[in-house]
Image (tube, rainbow, N blue to C red):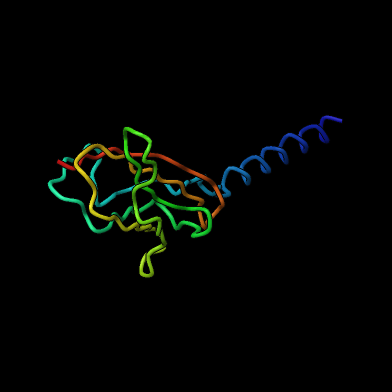
Amino acid sequence: MKSLLTRLIASSGLVLAACAAVPIAAQAHATLVKCTVAPGAMLAATPKTISCTFAEGVNPKGSFIGVFQATGDKGEVDRQNSALSFSNVKQLTVGLPKLAKGSYNLIWFTISADDGHRAAGNLNFTIK
């Protein structure tokens, strides 16, 4: 009986050691890494486009960036053409018309192309 118990303990230790040695995939999300408009930026003029780069590739179906007026009820003020970059699967770009002076919110929502995880966030900027 002691021999069987010793073997069970030894084999369970080997199984635990083997499991610990197997790498586990990181649970990452397509979170914002950088944007052509910095959070809190005070811009003298409206940029023609805003591009945001994320930590991993984004699924073009369901991922977007949009610019909204911070106050009032005007809603989305960009050209509503948010699209994945042709040269970088981690980058979304949206076009802008000339914006009036004021505060704006850039809102982003991504679905990871790698694992389908969702992420979202926002940043504010001002046109002086």
Note whether 7 is above or below 117 in the view shown.
Answer: above
Q: Residue at x 40, y 59 (%)?
A: 81
Q: Residue at x 29, y 40 (%)?
A: 104
Instruction: Report the front residue among 23 and 37.
Output: 37
Marks counted in the figure total: 0
Q: Residue at x 49, y 60 (%)?
A: 60
Question: Looking at the image, which residue sits at the far bottom?
Answer: 86
- Where residue 6 sits, quadrant-wise, is top right
Viewport quadrant of the C terminus: top left
Picture coordinates of residue 48 (x, y %)? 24, 58
Instruction: Report the front residue among 118 and 20.
Output: 118
Question: Looking at the image, which residue sits at the far top?
Answer: 2
- Where residue 42 sits, quadrant-wise, is top left
Q: Residue at x 31, y 58 (%)?
A: 95
Note whether 48 is above or below 34 in the view shown.
Answer: below
In the image, 52: left or right of 60?
left
Question: Looking at the image, which residue sits at the far right?
Answer: 1
Note whether 74 is above or below 84 in the view shown.
Answer: above
Instruction: Report the front residue among 71 and 29.
Output: 71
Viewport quadrant of the N terminus: top right
Picture coordinates of residue 28 (x, y %)? 48, 46
